[in-house]
Image (cartoon, rainbow, N blue to C red):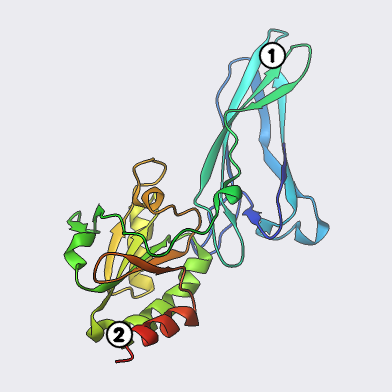
Amino acid sequence: MKATVKEPWHIYTQQVSNAGLAMPTQISLKKNSNIQLIDATKEKGIEKEHEQSSYYSKGVIFTQSLKLKSKEKTNLNFTIQYMACTNGMCLPPKTEKFSISFNTDSLVALKSSANDSSTLIKEEDNTKQANVFILKDAKDKEHSLSEFKGKYVLVDFWASWCKPCRAENPNLIKAYKEFKSKNFEIISISLDQNKDSWIRAVKKDSLSWLNLLDKTNSESTVANMYGVITVPSNFLIDPDGKIVAKDLKGEKLQTKLSEIFKN
């Protein structure tokens, strides 16, 4: 299986270990009584300089040796879960289903679905009304955006496995310390699937504001409600509940808040 990666994206190896800041590519093969798997799935980067790296920026070839026990027609079903990132953002982990047919006229690999998420990234009007949501904190207590009516609120989408998100957290901490007393709040919404990983990251990064957990892989998630494709992503909401800015990263957040609270 050959995976081609478009610049400036990269995907991770099966063995990546980077303090939880990346999710490894996971290939899960379904058991089949007519197929004997030989050794584990191997991988090789397409570009030599990245063979020993924890990610592949141009592509990777995965190979799996196997033995067919009979000449009967059979299918090997498997899933590939992967995460794609750039140096500045990540797509949430995605799972694709595949099926390869053996002992037929031709060897065919079928993917269950195709969706190039990069084509979904687009600019939207920054002055629309923010969607009200209800999510739970680490103690399973529900919180609503409506609790913060009358304040400027930065709704920040992130995840523990997102390295660019973790690198951005110090900027949020700096802004929170400076503007908290001036009617400003932050709500961080994590896309983590693992609750423990999320809680550890909140503690390690010293995120002292409200932290909530979104449910991933569902059309009803708050991330989908806000049209979030990559993380980190954030939305600045004014006291009237309108989105007045988005993706305020680095010094952009500090500059915007300084403009708002200059008086």
Mark 2 secondary-structure assignment: helix
Nearest to N terminus: mark 2 or mark 1: 1
Left or right: 163 as drawn, with respect to 4: left
The image shows residue 199 at horizontal and vertical percentages of: 32, 62
Quadrant (top left/top right/bottom left/bottom right) for the N terminus? top right
Q: Is residue 213 above or below residue 238?
A: above
| Kind of residue at badge 2 | Phe
Pick the residue in front: 167 or 43: 167
Q: Is residue 201 above or below residue 100?
A: below
Task: Name the residue located 19 percent from the left edge and 61 percent from the top edge.
Answer: 146
Image-quadrant location for residue 104: top right
Left or right: 10 as drawn, with respect to 165: right
Left or right: 35 as drawn, with respect to 208: right
The image shows residue 168 at horizontal and vertical percentages of: 47, 73
Pick the residue in front: 184 or 39: 184
Task: Name the residue located 75 percent from the left edge and 48 percent from the top edge.
Answer: 44
Task: Name the residue located 53 percent from the left edge and 39 percent from the top edge.
Answer: 95
| Kind of residue at badge 1 | Lys
User: In the displayed image of the protein, which residue is found farthest to the bottom?
Assistant: 263
Residue 69 is marked as 1
Q: Is residue 2 above or below residue 243?
A: above
Task: Name the residue located 61 percent from the left edge and 44 percent from the top edge.
Answer: 116
* Circle 2 residue: 179
Question: Disc 2 and disc 1: Cα gap in Å?
Answer: 67 Å
Pick the residue in front: 205 or 52: 205
The image shows residue 244 at horizontal and vertical percentages of: 37, 69
